């Protein structure tokens, strides 16, 4: 009877752990989506500000130096968000739930009784 209670407890603990892990994954995915929106909006803002500066100075054109500056601004603005995204993905990879091996437990109990 004690083994049955132990097995049921293990299964229930596993189900709870699985729900918690899924909840953590969903929170991380929501954070990644939010960060991606923020990054996109910030990049648009930074680039439009720079284009406005070029326009105000009379340098509004598609010169190579302008494109290089805009590309650098885009990269510098996105970099912290990309780092955070990598960290969040690493956190998701670390979320694991160990599934109870009830067959192994039962076999060891039978071996203990028979041996």
Image (tube, rainbow, N blue to C red):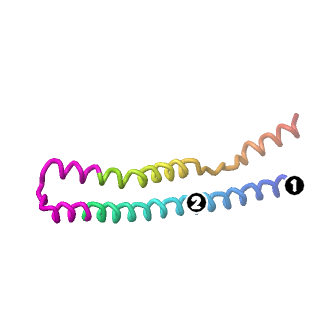
Q: Find residue 112 and report its horizontal and vertical position in percent.
A: 86, 38
Residue at x 34% of width, y 65% of height: 41
Whether residue 66 sits left or right of residue 91 in the image: it is left
Q: Find residue 20 and report its horizontal and vertical position in percent.
A: 63, 61
Instruction: Quickly name the residue at label 2.
Output: 24
Image quarter hosting the N terminus: bottom right
Q: Quick check: 96 above or below 46?
A: above
What span is colored magenta in the figure? 49-72
The reply to whether the magenta stretch includes residue 56 is yes
The front one of 8 and 83 is: 83
Residue at x 30% of width, y 61% of height: 46
Q: Quick check: 68 above or below 13?
A: above
* Few, some or many residues within 10 Å of mark 1 (<14, 14–19, 20+): few
Image quarter hosting the C terminus: top right
The front one of 14 and 85 is: 85
Q: Secondary structure at mark 2?
A: helix
Q: Find residue 32 and report its horizontal and vertical position in percent.
A: 45, 59
Instruction: Quickly name the residue at label 1.
Output: 2
Q: Find residue 74 and report its horizontal and vertical position in percent.
A: 30, 54
Counting residues from the start of the chain, the first of labels 1 and 2 encountered is: 1
Would you say the magenta stretch is mainly helix, strand or loop? helix
How many angstroms separate mark 1 from mark 2 (CA)?
33 Å
């Amino acid at each position: 009877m004690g083994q049955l209670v132990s097995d049921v407890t293990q299964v229930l603990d596993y189900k709870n752990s699985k729900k918690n892990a899924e909840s953590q994954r969903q929170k991380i995915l929501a954070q990644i989506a939010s960060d991606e929106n923020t990054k996109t909006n910030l990049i648009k803002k930074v680039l439009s500000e720079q284009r406005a500066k070029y326009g105000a100075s009379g340098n509004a054109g598609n010169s190579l130096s302008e494109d290089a500056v805009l590309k650098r601004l885009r990269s510098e603005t996105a970099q912290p968000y990309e780092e955070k995204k990598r960290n969040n993905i690493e956190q998701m990879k670390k979320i694991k739930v160990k599934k109870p091996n009830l067959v192994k437990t039962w076999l060891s109990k039978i071996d203990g009784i028979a041996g």
